[in-house]
Image: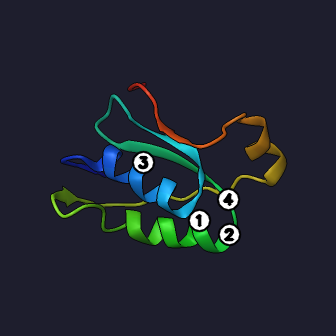
Amino acid sequence: MQGVWYRGWTVEEARRRGLDGWVRNRRDGSVEAVFVGPASLVAAMLESCAHGPPAAVVTALAVMDVDSDAAKSLGTKGFRQRATE
């Protein structure tokens, strides 16, 4: 899933919802993100990601749940954009 300004839009949307985590491009052209927060807010963010910003073309969305201990071990406070990996 990727389109014009997808990562920047993701950062704005996640911060607006008060989520922690990160987003980055992958070398294969996909976008990867980790969202940490209340389940209802994460679910709403995932629903938004399925559509993305107006210029995006989202072809698939894969979701993997991570338990709260693993999420905490990410050491992420706030939401940010990471470099491509």
Mark in front: 3 vs 2:
3
Mark 1 near mark 2, Cβ–Cβ under 8 Å? Answer: yes
**Sequence-wise, which precedes: disc 1 or disc 3?**
3
Residue with the mark numbered 1: 42
Relative image position of residue 50 (x, y in whole percent)? 37, 67
Residue with the mark numbered 4: 37
Residue with the mark numbered 2: 39
- Any mark on residue 11, and which? 3
Residue 47, relative to residue 33: is it above or below? Answer: below
Q: For numbered disc 3, what is the local secondary structure?
A: helix
The residue that appears at 71% across and 52% down in the rendered structure is 66
Task: Pick the residue in front: 65 or 74.
Answer: 74
Mark 4 near mark 1, Cβ–Cβ under 8 Å? Answer: yes
**Sequence-wise, which precedes: disc 3 or disc 2?**
3
Q: For numbered disc 1, what is the local secondary structure?
A: helix
Instruction: Identify the amino acid type marked 1.
Output: Val
